[in-house]
Image: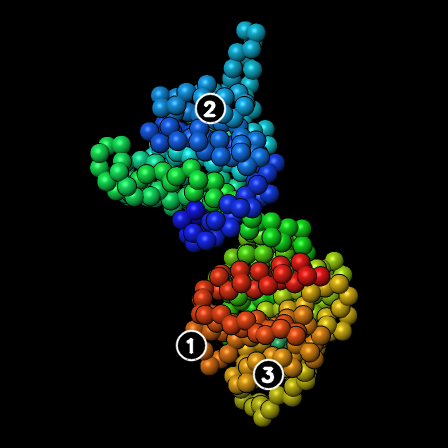
């Protein structure tokens, strides 16, 4: 999740210095609801406008008791909208929430009162702000602001969880002195941090914008007979984390996935489900010419039964041995056909990890290889974490600590971005 809070101060500073380019020319809908924190909203508008953003304010009637439309229309340089219709020369004009929802690159609801959060979660479209929210096709950020007891009430928490589950991005409330005189969690995040959260989102989204990336994930299954197969314990988690992170960073991702369970792909990822190494090979080749990069994180079976037996092998018939033949090495095949594509392999090694991985990098004509060692606890198959080294030709390996697979995915994609930049 992108929030202003989970950024290191140095990261914030770096983002601030490139903020102009990230937010410049973006169109943002600012929804303002009834909370004392609305007095900070003009400052949000001011910071966004300073970054080159076109800001359209949509406010609820309750918000007007805390901040005037005139203040907001002055700082945003646009008419403020708050009702479904307005009078123009005594004719009613429809404020089209669908058009507003399509216009925006992002919607930010700040402050988001408990009442507005509830309406957003329940699709209770009794004002223009909620109707616009429900019509929005863009990412939606919400910055709650309310008294601490309201904030921690289970009903409010449930609404926030619903909103997050629906794909909205929370900019968490902070702790401090509240308007009620109480101290606690419920203060809207500061305008600078809210803008930083938007910057982070657009920065991450743009890192791989427009790149076509093939990612393979999971195991392959090679049939012995109609019910049995040779497979492995790969969960596909690393490949799905890579695919989802690349999609969030603006890449067009084709995820070629062997059989896995419990993984879900970002809505913009094109998923191709395959079973065997041969099917994975063909899916890769089909998409290879248009690809800018391939991340081969699948655990492809190295061998398959020489002949698939058409009928289920009966126990009483016995089976002494299964004759095996190698599958095609997909990555080596892609390496031999390589033109403009960046190829990144993955290697799980049990000994001399870097040396073996270096050999694979050269043998398969790769640009880089992600190495993990079975000797490292928490790395490899099935875990939610991974500990990797990133190895490129002619540069020293970069070693990382044990991290979640989502964080590892970001590290790998940062390397990919650097390789693209160097090309
Ligand atoms: N790979 C592949 N096709 C195969 C086997 C492996 O594309 N038939 C890819 C994997 O997806 C991975 C890389 O090659 O990105 C390295 O896989 P690995 O199993 O470590 O290497 P192998 O070449 O199979 O070598 P070995 O099993 O002997 O270590």
Residue under circle 1? 377
Residue 218 image label? none
Residue 355 image label? 3
- Looking at this view, is 39 or 56 the one in front? 39
- Above or below, 377 against 32 in this view is below
- Above or below, 244 against 336 in this view is above
329 displayed left or right of 261: right
| Image x and y of residue 268, in percent | 60, 50
| Image x and y of residue 15, in percent | 51, 48
Q: CA distance from mark 2 to mark 3?
A: 62 Å
Q: Secondary structure at mark 2?
A: helix
| Image x and y of residue 308, in percent | 66, 80
Residue at x-position 51% and y-position 72%: 399
Q: Secondary structure at mark 3?
A: helix
378 displayed left or right of 180: right
Which of the 4 image quadrants contains residue 280?
bottom right
């Amino acid at each position: 999740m992108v929030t202003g809070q989970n950024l290191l101060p140095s990261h914030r500073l770096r983002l601030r210095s490139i903020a102009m380019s990230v937010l410049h020319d973006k169109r943002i809908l600012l929804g303002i609801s009834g909370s004392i924190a609305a007095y900070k909203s003009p400052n949000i508008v001011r910071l966004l406008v300073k970054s080159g953003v076109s800001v359209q304010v949509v406010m609820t009637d309750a918000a007007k008791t805390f901040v005037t439309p005139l203040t907001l229309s002055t700082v945003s340089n646009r008419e403020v909208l708050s009702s479904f219709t307005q009078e123009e020369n005594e004719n009613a004009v429809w404020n089209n929430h669908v058009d507003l929802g399509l216009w925006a690159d992002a919607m930010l609801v700040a402050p988001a009162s408990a009442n507005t959060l509830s309406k957003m979660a329940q699709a209770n479209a009794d004002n223009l702000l909620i109707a616009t929210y429900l019509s929005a096709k863009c990412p939606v950020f919400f910055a709650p602001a309310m008294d601490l007891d309201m904030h921690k009430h289970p009903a409010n928490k449930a609404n926030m969880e619903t909103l997050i589950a629906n794909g909205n991005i929370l900019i968490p409330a902070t702790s401090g002195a509240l308007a009620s005189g109480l101290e606690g969690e419920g203060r809207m995040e500061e305008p600078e941090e809210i803008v930083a959260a938007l910057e982070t989102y657009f920065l991450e989204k743009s890192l791989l914008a427009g790149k076509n990336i093939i990612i393979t994930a999971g195991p392959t299954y090679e049939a012995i007979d109609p019910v049995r197969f040779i497979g492995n314990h790969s969960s596909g988690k690393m490949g799905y984390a890579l695919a989802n992170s690349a999609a969030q960073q603006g890449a067009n991702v084709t995820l070629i996935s062997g059989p896995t369970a419990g993984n879900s792909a970002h809505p913009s990822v094109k998923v191709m489900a395959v079973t065997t190494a041969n099917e994975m090979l063909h899916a890769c080749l089909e998409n290879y010419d248009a690809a800018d990069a391939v991340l081969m994180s699948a655990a492809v079976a190295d061998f398959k039964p020489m002949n698939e037996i058409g009928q289920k092998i009966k126990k009483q018939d016995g089976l002494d041995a299964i004759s095996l033949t190698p599958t095609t090495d997909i990555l080596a095949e892609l390496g031999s056909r390589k033109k403009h594509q960046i190829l990144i392999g993955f290697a799980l090694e049990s000994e001399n990890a870097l040396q073996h991985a270096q050999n694979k990098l050269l043998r398969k004509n790769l640009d880089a290889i992600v190495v993990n060692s079975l000797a490292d606890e928490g790395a490899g198959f099935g875990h939610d974490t991974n500990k990797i080294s990133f190895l490129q030709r002619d540069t020293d390996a970069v070693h990382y600590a044990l991290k979640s697979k989502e964080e590892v995915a970001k590290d790998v994609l940062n390397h990919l971005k650097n390789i693209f930049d160097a090309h």
